[in-house]
Image (cartoon, grey):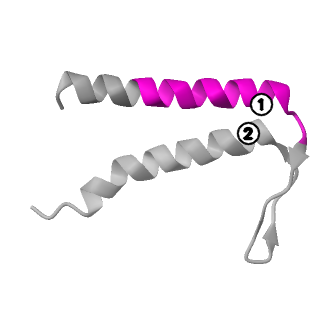
Amino acid sequence: MKPIPAILICVILAVWVGAIAILSVQNATPVQLSFLGLQSIQMPVGVVLAFSVAIGTIAGAIAPLIWNNK
């Protein structure tokens, strides 16, 4: 990977982590997720955002490996 895209990816990820940290400190209200009739336990908004970003980052890193057309 070339250095400029790697640096750009790191900067974007750092901004996301910073935004999650700021939001979680300011908003500690517990939320409950519901999906297809299933409900989760109540968790702070920052924890939900952190898990969402982590899952999205991992999925984004794995997706090109799965759909590689070469």
Q: Is residue 34 above or below residue 62?
A: below
Q: Quadrant of the C terminus?
A: bottom left
Q: Which residue is mark 1?
A: 24
Q: What secondary structure is found at the residue carrying circle 2?
A: helix
**32 inside magenta stretch:** no
Mark number, residue 36: none
Q: CA distance from mark 2 to mark 1?
A: 8 Å
- Vertical placement of residue 36 versus 29, above or below: below
- In the rendered image, residue 56, in percent from the top left (x then y), is placed at 50, 49
Please provide percent x and percent y for residue 17.
Answer: 58, 28
Residue type, numbered disc 1:
Ser
Question: In percent of the image, x 56 and y 31: which residue is there?
Answer: 16
| x and y percentages locating residue 51 in the rendered image | 64, 44
In the image, what residue occupies the spot 46% across and 44% down? Answer: 57
Figure quadrant of residue 64: bottom left
Q: Which residue is mark 2?
A: 47
Magenta stretch prevailing secondary structure: helix
What is the span of residues highlighted in magenta in the rendered image? 11-29
Left or right: 19 in relation to 12: right
At a point 37% along the width and 31% down the height, the residue shown is 9
- The residue sitting at the left extreme is 70
Residue 34 sits in quarter: bottom right
Q: Earlier in the sequence, mark 2 or mark 1?
A: 1
Q: At 61% across and 23% down in the image, what residue appears?
A: 18
**Toward which corner of the image does residue 24 lie, by quadrant?**
top right
Depth check: 38 or 18 in front? 18
Q: In this image, 49 relative to 4: left or right? A: right
Give the residue type at disc 2.
Val
Give the side of residue 16 with respect to residue 3, left or right.
right
